[in-house]
Each structure stands twice: as C-alpha cells, then as structure tokens.
C-alpha cells in the first residue's frame, strides 16, 4: 500500500509544483547520484525547473553521467524552491551544508529503499524491496509518462548496476533484470558504463590500497574482518576520499567472514564505518546503534570519535550481534 500511495502522492506533488531542488546523501554513491540526475532529467522534460546538488563532490568515476557537470555545489544554491526531493536516504543524511534547506523549502519529498528510513516526511516513498533507488525512479518516470531517453537510461542503469554489485548481490531480482534490460534498450550501453566504473583507477588508488591492505584483520574465529584507512594514508598516497570506494570488498572477500567493515578516518578526526554482511547478520541494525543505517547486507555509520576508540567499540557490538544471531 505504501508503494502505491507514495508514488501517487509524489506524482501529484510534481504536477502541482514548479521549482525543485534534488539531492542524495553525504559521500554520494552512483545510486544516489544516478537517481538525482535521472530525477533532474525527468523533471526538466516535464517542463519543471530542477536543480541537482550534492553535499559532497561528485566522485571522478561517475562524472561521465549525463548532467553531472550541472550539479550545483551547496554553497552556490539560490532559492526559492517549491519542493526538495531527497533520494537514497532519510533527510538527516544530506549533510550540514544542505540541512538548512529543509526549513527553507515548504515541501520535502523523500524517495528511498533503506529499511531503516524512519518514514517521517509527509510525502515519502520507501520501498526496501527495491534493489536500488534507480529502480524506483525508473517506475516514477513510467508513472509520469516521461520518455526514458538515453541520458536517463544511462543514469538509472548505473544506479542499479552499482547497488546490486554488478547484479551479484542478493537484492537482485527478476524485476531488476527486466528494468536493466529495458534501460539498455533505451540507450544505456553496459560495456562503456562498466569500463568507466570499474575498468581503470588512478595510480593514487593503488598507492592508497597498498597502504590499507596491511591493516586487514580478523577475529580469532575469522567471522569478523575489517580494514582501516587513516588520514595519513590518504595524504601519503595523494588520493581523494572517493578513491576508497569499494575498499570494503576486501575484508568481505575473506573466506569465513560473516561481518566485514571498513573504518575510515575523516579529516575531522571522526570515524566513518562501512558494514557488510554475508548472510546471517542484519548490519543495518548494527549501524543503527551508531546513528547510521542502510540495508541488511550493506550499511554505514558516522561515529563522532577517533579510530582508537571507534574500532574496539564497533567490534564488540558486531561480535554481540553475531553471537546472538542463530546460525
């Protein structure tokens, strides 16, 4: 019922309003950015005035997305806006640079697929069964009778491809493949998109990876694995923060690991944690304990404390979640 009522209320809100601000979450991933840009393209085709923004810079790997060059930094935004569309997260994850706009815009529209979304906005559409927000924006385009042309198809295919781990994760369904197939038919080209996302990395990426891999650790029983990236490593490698995207896959690849984590030291001295789960533990619940959220198999959190205290505290809670989960 929520899916149907949610999409209908969004359709009506789009019809009634004209100027839209669109964003996703901090540390934007391709699902968030692809969905933001697809929303902008869709609204523009409907004759609306749409502005896309991002709380953090667009990662190099997804700057090929059509319209990425038009994303406006938060400090350059000029209102007023009739509605604020937030995708791939709850409004509390859009970052301090964009948070003031929550009070400046009268209508908040929230589109998300994370189970941990509190569903507090008057107009929200939360579908945890969707493999990616890109799937939801695809359905919204169809519901709005917008022709999905090549720019929209590329943005949405990229969103779905990445949030399903190239269709490897358990969130991949028959519907996911059907939508991806339709997007390919509408102009998304799998080979160049995959090449842009995965085919090459700057030298600084490998310099950072060489420094991070020696931190790869596991508990005595091997069920919990983790890796750490410090500010010093990033500086020594000459890397950008977005270049560690996907590093969490390395602890996850360790045979026998049930919970895997990447600890990242931020410039502020705080700690960001990415969680992954094989098949037993719902890491979204683990992330919630630290003010974060996400999916059962992939989640994240920001801890307002240094690595030295964050790592042992998170490991202790991860161990408890693992011990209390039936095998």
Image (spheres, rainbow, N blue to C red):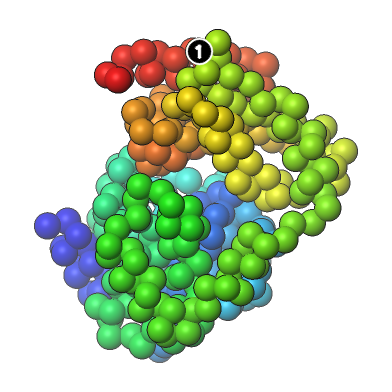
Quarter of the rendering containing residue 136: bottom left
Q: Nearer the viewer, residue 90 or 236?
A: 236
Residue 82 appears in the rendering: no
The residue that appears at 50% across and 67% down in the rendered structure is: 158
Q: Residues within 10 Å of mark 1 (few under 14, many from 20)?
A: few
- The image shows residue 219 at horizontal and vertical percentages of 55, 14
Task: Identify the residue at the far front of this view.
Answer: 255
Quarter of the rendering containing residue 251: top right
In the depicted structure, whether residue 260 falls above or below residue 49: above
**In the drawing, does residue 271 fall left or right of residue 183?**
right
Which quadrant would the C terminus be assigned to in this image?
top left
Residue 178 appears in the rendering: yes
- The image shows residue 200 at horizontal and vertical percentages of 72, 61
- The image shows residue 91 at horizontal and vertical percentages of 42, 50
**In the drawing, does residue 147 fall left or right of residue 308?**
left
The residue that appears at 24% across and 78% down in the rendered structure is: 143
Find disc 1 in the rendering and name its residue.
221
């Amino acid at each position: 019922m929520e899916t149907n009522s949610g999409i209908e209320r969004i359709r009506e809100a789009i019809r009634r309003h004209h100027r839209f601000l669109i964003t996703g979450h901090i540390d934007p991933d391709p699902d968030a950015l692809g969905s933001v840009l697809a929303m902008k393209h869709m609204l523009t085709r409907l004759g609306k005035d749409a502005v896309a923004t991002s709380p953090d810079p667009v990662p190099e790997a997804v700057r090929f997305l059509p319209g990425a060059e038009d994303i406006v930094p938060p400090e350059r935004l000029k209102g007023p806006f009739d509605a604020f569309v937030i995708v791939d997260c709850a409004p509390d994850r859009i970052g301090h640079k964009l948070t003031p706009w929550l009070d400046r815009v009268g209508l908040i529209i929230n589109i998300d697929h994370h189970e941990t979304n509190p569903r507090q906005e008057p107009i929200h559409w939360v579908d945890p069964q969707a493999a990616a927000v890109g799937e939801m924006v695809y359905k919204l385009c169809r519901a709005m009778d917008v022709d999905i042309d090549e720019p929209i198809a590329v943005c949405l295919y990229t969103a779905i491809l990445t949030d399903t781990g190239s269709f490897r994760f358990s969130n991949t369904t028959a519907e996911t493949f059907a939508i991806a197939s339709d997007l390919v038919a509408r102009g998304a080209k799998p080979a160049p998109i995959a090449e842009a996302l995965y085919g090459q990395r700057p030298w600084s990426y490998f310099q950072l990876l060489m420094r991070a891999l020696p931190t790869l650790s596991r508990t005595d029983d091997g069920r919990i694995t983790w890796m750490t990236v410090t500010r010093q490593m990033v500086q020594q490698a000459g890397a950008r923060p977005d270049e560690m995207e996907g590093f969490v896959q390395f602890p996850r690849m360790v045979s026998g690991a049930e919970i895997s984590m990447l600890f990242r030291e931020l410039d502020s001295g705080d700690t960001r944690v990415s969680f992954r789960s094989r098949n037993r533990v719902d890491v979204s619940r683990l992330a919630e304990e630290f003010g974060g959220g996400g999916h059962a198999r992939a989640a994240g959190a920001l801890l307002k404390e240094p690595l030295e205290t964050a790592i042992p505290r998170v490991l202790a809670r991860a161990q408890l979640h693992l011990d209390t989960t039936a095998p």
